[in-house]
Image (tube, rainbow, N blue to C red):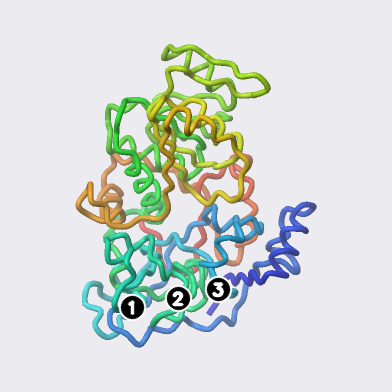
Amino acid sequence: MRGVLATPTTPRYLWTAAAGRVRHQAGWGPGGILRLADDLPQPQLPDAPGWVRVRPELSGVCGSDLGLAHAKISFVLSAIYRSERIIPGHEMVAVVTETGPGATEVSEGDRVVVNPLMSCAQRGFDPMCATCASGFPHLCERLDEAGVIDCTAPAAGFAEAVGGGWGEQVVSHQSQLYRVGDIPSRRAVLAEPASIGLHAALRWRRAGDRAVVIGPGTIGLLVTAALRMLHPDLDIAMVSPGEFGSRRARAAGADRILPSGPEAVEELARADGGRVLRPRMTRIPILEQGVDVVFDCVGSPDTLELATHILRPRGTLVLIGAAGKQTADWSLVWHRELTVAGSVFYGPEPDLGVTTFAQVVEWLADPGYRIDDMVTHTYELADWTQALDTASAGPGAGAVKVTLRPNPDLPLVG
């Protein structure tokens, strides 16, 4: 089987991190973490009911994939992501090509999107861990344990055993699959990051009318699109440093654009009122009449400081993505009694009565869900290094979501 293989052993990871300081493409160059291989073993259907084989039609390049390629993922997460042979690619729309025993919910030829997460239910653990039993399988306590799938990572795209979307085949449990019919490929491939965006939006129980999203990348745009679907009357501002991201944010549903850094505070004060408080020896001032919620989709020291400085007392900060070790001043968290909520993955959504993926698939079929044109680039698997160059360059290359096409014989829909 052909696919991109990652081998993030500690020596190779450290070498890539060091070499990356002088050579941006170190992760996919000689000695780096990633390489294209033509002789990968096909992932095998587990000896358990309900498993199927799929061929990816289109697969996304995610920020976490770039974190792996550039050796910038926190070592803390290595306790959970233990596989040292990985076929990346956890965002995919695919076609079912083989159904194993007990697989009755999908059929060969079905177009599906894949929830890549595998918790106790898919791994065959009985009894389930306490978290899964409580209805939060996305926070499973045994994501690093192999079970029937021989996978020591939380999801497809993070281990060789089940494959990933940057390879020609993947195996999935039928419970991970959602039929998408004739939804266009370039919308369907966004199902996984869109589910992250929706789950993050739901981490805020609405209390107020003003929201700020920081970061007009894929996740920030999908958070914005989800907020617009959930709260049509919500005032949504996007912190965007450039016109490329600003145009995309407006298209996704943002009402207005804020500059980054201290100017964001000044602009909010001018537009919405409230004093600007100016601490000594601090670059970013504090907004007295702050906003109700901030979704930080960047997670840098600067964005964390901005977020806490523009929130009203008892406001909510939702942290999304794979931030690592950061230095931040959390004084206003306790002084203003802010709520800080982490958000990761997707799962059952009690407030909606369905899973995140099920809701997103319904939205994908709705033209009012404003995500068209987020897929900006598509490359054949042979051109995977160019895809990584483009995704890494981001707005500089006119890129939002970059995708790979591992099986060019599968026609794209739409």
Mark 2: give few (<14), some (14-19) or many (20+) Cα within 10 Å: many
> For residue 172, what is the image quadrant?
bottom left
- Residue 198 placement (x, y as % from top left): 34, 46
Amino acid marked by disc 1: Phe
Query: Which tag, 2 or 3, sits closer to the chain's start?
Result: 3
Name the residue furthest bottom. Answer: 47
- Residue 265 placement (x, y as % from top left): 52, 20
Element class at badge 1: loop
Is 260 drawn above or below residue 383 in the view shown? above
Q: Nearer the viewer, mark 3 or mark 1?
A: 1
Residue plotted at (57% across, 20% down): 285
Element class at badge 2: loop
| Residue annotated with mark 2 | 145
Q: Is residue 215 left or right of residue 293?
A: right
Between the C-alphas of marks 2 and 3, the distance is 11 Å
Residue plotted at (34% across, 72% down): 120
Amino acid marked by disc 2: Glu
Mark 3: give few (<14), some (14-19) or many (20+) Cα within 10 Å: many
Query: Which tag, 1 or 2, sits closer to the chain's start?
Result: 1
- Residue 235 placement (x, y as % from top left): 35, 25
Between the C-alphas of marks 1 and 2, the distance is 10 Å
Element class at badge 3: loop
| Residue annotated with mark 1 | 125
Q: Is residue 269 left or right of residue 371?
A: right
